[in-house]
Amino acid sequence: MEKSTWYKDKVWNNMSTYFEVIGDDKRVVIDDKFACMEVVDSFPLSQCKKEDMFSNAAAGAGHNYYYKFPSGHSIPDDALVGISLNGITSEVPFSYFAIGDTIRFYGDGSAVAQVGIVGIERDDIIATSTLYMFNHATRTPSEHGTGLEIINDKNEIVFSSERPYINVLKCGNDEKDSVSTASTKPIIACNLGYDYFYEFYEQSHHSSPQGVESLKRPTYILKNQVVSIVPRFFNTFWTGDSQAPEYNPDTGEWTYPDNGGPEYGGFYEFDAWYNYGWLVGTIC
């Protein structure tokens, strides 16, 4: 196909070998490589069922809540997941994590010493928010043959005007930012990733462990029709008196304290990754 560029005054110019649509600001908004994610599934979170992972634990273990999706819904591989913010009136900050067919929330009370970082109740969000899943879907021609569709040289539809796509309003990482939620369209908060650091050791089996598990998650704060996004750490600390082993980078050997180490049931664990990020968008 010859490239055709459609300006505001509807003048067509033959230039190259593909199709572009240029908006009023002279920005290319659609071309034959268009790959924006579209909505592949959505449902009200009010359809979820609340569960407590500690419900069968011993008395005094506390709670670890998650919300299970309704039957027939689960997050596909490589999907971008977000929840709508418009109807949330609480100003209490929250983070969330959605995986498989569950969503969990974090906030005050999420870190329990020597237990782990646990999910908390956020029934207020569940009652009003909608969960959206975005992905690069396999598309077929529209049933009625109406609207605008762009087909590439592999006979794949890369854009269809009947599909709802994500429109990115802002995305970022460590810096604090804010986005207006005063919109008739859903304003959707998506997590792009989180930072994780874990270091744990004990001199002998189940004896006075020391260590930390730390997660830095995007945290959302809603106030006066504005959502602020800030990084927040959720930590669990083990405060026993075990001594950490020493590592010699030159020899690759570990030196454990007396009566410590694997032969005495002790061990050292370390894990970390860093991919914190967030995205706020709407649907176009």
Image (cartoon, grey):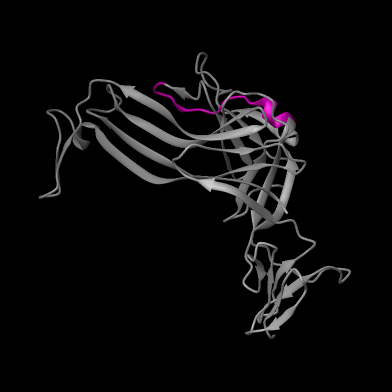
Q: Is residue 141 above or below residue 231?
A: below
Residue 38 appears at what percent x and percent y? 69, 57
State which quadrant residue 95 falls in. top right
Position of residue 279 in the picture relative to residue 142 (left or right): left
| Residue 251 vertical placement versus 154 (above, below) | above
Residue at (19, 34) in percent of width and height? 261
- 120 part of magenta stretch: yes
**Of 97 and 166, the residue lying toward us:** 166
Residue at 51% x, 28% y is 118
Q: Residue furthest top?
A: 60
Relative to 20, is 140 on the left or the right? Answer: right
Residue 139, given in percent of the width and then of the height, sits at 73, 67
Q: Is residue 72 visible?
A: no
Q: Nearer the viewer, residue 192 or 52?
A: 192
Where is the C terminus found, in terms of image quarters? bottom right
Q: Quadrant of the N terminus?
A: bottom right
Q: Is residue 84 left or right of 116 when viewed as pictured?
A: right
- Residue span colored magenta: 113-127
Figure disc tally: 0
Is 282 one of the magenta-colored residues? Answer: no
98 with respect to 149 (left or right):
left
